[in-house]
Every structure is written in C-alpha cells, then in structure tokens.
Amino acid sequence: MKQSQLFAKARREAPADEVSKNAQLLIRAGYVHKEMAGVYSYLPLGKRVLEKIERIVREEMDAIGGQEIRMATLHPSEPWKQTGAWDKVDVVFKINSRTEKEYTIGQSEEEIVTPIAQEYVNSYRDLPLAVYQIGQKYRDELRAKSGIMRGREFTMKDMYSFHETQEDFDRFYEGAKQAYLRVYRRVGLVAKATEASGGSFTNKLSYEFMVLTDAGEDDILYCSECPYCVNVEISDQKEGDACTRCGKGTLSRAKASEVGNIFDLGTKYPTDFSFTYKDRAGKDQKPIMGCFGIGITRLMGVVVETFADDKGIVWPEGVAPFAAHLVSLGKPSDDVSKLASGFYTELLEKGIEVLYDDRDLRPGEKFAESDLLGIPKRIVVGKDATGSGVFELVDRKTGTVEKIERDELIARFARHG
Ligand code: ATP
Ligand code: MG
C-alpha cells in the first residue's frame, strides 16, 4: 500500500481526552478513530492488525476442532430472561423498540448458542460439539478509561463447547488451554494462566489468561519459579508468600490484563433451556458446557502497551499491519524514487506485505512517522542506493541498522512470509 493513498494520516498531537497509552498512540498513528468513551472505529492499519490477530485465533480454534459460525448480535430479550441474565448481569444493554418489544445486543452468546446446539444435538453421536465466532460485543461498562482494552463495544472470540462426559470436557478444556497459550505466544505475548473462581452462575473453576502490564486492571500473584499464578481478588495469599505449588519460589504481585478466559459452565444453560440428548442407553441427559473467550481488541491494546517506546508503537512480527515499511528519500520522479518504486513492485510481486512511503516529505518527518507506526522493519532507499544497489534495513525494536543488497533483502522477507 502506498502511504500517499492512506487516508488516515498520522498526527503529531495526542488527543487531549485520552489517558491510556494504547489509545493515544493508536489514534495519533491513525489506526483507530474514537467515537466516544469505550467505542472506537478501526481504520485501514488498525483493521489489518485485527485481521492478523483474528487469523491466529482462527487457526488455533480450528486446530482443536472448533467450527466457526456468526451469531446474531441483536437478541430477543426472552432467552436472557430465561437464564436470569436480563436482571442479574449489570452490563447487559436493554433496548426498547417502538413496538414495545425488548431486545439486547450481545455481551456474550450463551443465550443464543445453547438453543442453536439444542436444535442439532439429539444424540450422544452429535457430541462433542465446539462452535466459535469472532465478532462484536456490547457491554454497559461503568469505566472505560483503558482505551481499546476496555470497550463498551469490542471484538471477542467466543467459543462454546458441549460434551457427553466430564472426562471429555476435561480433555477439551486442557486442549483449549494449550491452544490459548499458543495464541498469545504467536501474538508476541507471554500469558499466565491464573486459576480463578467461575463466572456469575457457577462455582466451578476457570482459568484467566493474564499478561503482566501496568495498564491492566487486575492484580495477580505469580510464582518466581513455576507457572503458578492467581488473581489477588479471590486469593488469601499475599506477596512474599512461598508458592504452594512448587514450594521453591515466592509470590510476586503485579498488575495484569485479562486477555482471555475459559469456564466450565456445567449444565447451567442446558438446564435453563431444557436441552437434553439421548445417551448411549437411550436416556435423556444434559450436555456439559464450556465457554472460551479471547479479547481480540484488548489483545491489540495490550500489545501496544507492552512494546511501545518513547518513539511510538512497536509491533511484534506476528501482528504487524505490514512486514516492511519502505521509505523513499527521493524527490518526485528522480532516480531514488524510481528505484524505490521498482523495489516496491518487486516486494508486492513476491507477496511481501509492504507499506511504501512515497510521499515528498523531509527524511526526519518520514522517520519519525515510521517510528510512530511501528512496522517491525524499515527499508530506507536513499541516494547511495542508486549506485550500489544496497539498501538500509532498520529494526524498529532495537534500532539496529544493516546495509543489505537488494536480492538478499527480498530473500530475507520472503523467508519470513
Ligand atoms: P473483565 O474482568 O476484564 O471485565 P470479563 O470477565 O468480563 O473481563 P469475559 O466476559 O469472559 O470477560 O470476556 C472474555 C474476554 O473478553 C476477556 O477475557 C477480555 O479479554 C475480553 N473483554 C471483556 N470485557 C471487555 C471489554 N469491556 N473490552 C474489551 N475486551 C473485553
Ligand atoms: Mg467484565
């Protein structure tokens, strides 16, 4: 993509009404546009980052047998009344239509997915079943001061699974936990799986996946030696205590952001909807249900918070909007510009995702903007490149500069995809 054609331009000033680092940087760099507190639109660069995260999540959910669907966002109020959530869950938006019918917009989808599964699962042969979607969620959150990390509208991957036995549920649950840890690693983050109490309706155990960041809204205790980690809110342990899991480490306290969670819902929803299937003996049974969420837009915010430096955003390769930022220092139609344009075409032909800064601006301005955008590698085409065919490759994270010959540069990007 040519930067001259990118309509969402980067700006020098941070918006005055944003306190969070992620939203300040993403707005300045033209990734997102703020509509109101907790509601953002995603512009071309932001959309590309979301798609990268979504692709990783999709691949990992497909790999554990999830089937992707797209559920309705506008919901009738009846199933929400049937499960009790209409009155008990404070973040549920309630909409009155002019026909006096009440609706809600999805803040989670158990009320929609359970009746769908009920229609197709009649026998044990139809189990297990895992369906998921990646879509918008709406919550009447009280505080929305963490930028895209806590939205009133946000993107979530939510998966729901149905099982014949607790053993089968446990097998799937463990597989999902591992898939989640892979998702976070591929996004570029390290997440800890904390043990927490279950959701609003069950007292079963759940896992919350936490990334350490000062921008997070949770407080956790974690072991210095083993993966043990627990939410402070529910724990009677404190900082400095010996780890009860490994006995070797001590617990440290830190701020963290919850980037996903997985719950054993038991038979709560099948009970509410009188959902049974015929087991192997021909008897009616309720399936055991699980739900598995990942905050897609929150993940994007956490990535920004984790890696940004004083110059701007720094994307890990796995989620960057482009692999390379090609910056031409030429003037319109001089030799440098021609060389850069030819190289741009060649990168595109090789399938390399590249943003091409073809604008007629001062080098300092271009570099500052390139740093703000945070694309992992910058290729600079200056005067000396016209004679030597050697380009400068700058690593956004470390600032390391390498002089690399054109073909070698292409080969390197082609290898990284
Ligand atoms: P939190 O405790 O942060 O409010 P939650 O327990 O309400 O999260 P779930 O309802 O299970 O979260 O949603 C699944 C995932 O969606 C969360 O782990 C989080 O990553 C993300 N998420 C939840 N609420 C929001 C929000 N308001 N904005 C952005 N992402 C969110
Ligand atoms: Mg919440």
Image (cartoon, rainbow, N blue to C red):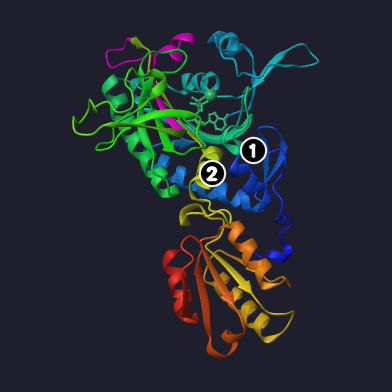
Tell me, yes or no, if residue 104 can be seen here: yes
Quadrant of the drawing holding the N terminus: bottom right
Image: 351 above or below 259: below
Magenta stretch holds residue 30: no
Tell me, yes or no, if residue 122 can be seen here: no
Q: Which residue is under mark 2?
A: 300
Q: Which residue is under mark 1?
A: 19
Rendering quarter of residue 414: bottom left
Query: x%, y% of residue 104?
Result: 65, 19
Rendering quarter of residue 6: bottom right
Magenta stretch holds residue 278: yes
Q: 356 or 270: which is nearer to us?
A: 356
Q: 10 or 154: which is nearer to us?
A: 10
Q: Amino acid at mark 2?
A: Met
Query: x%, y% of residue 396?
Result: 51, 62
Tell me which residue sits at (52%, 76%) in the image: 392
Image: 112 above or below 409: above
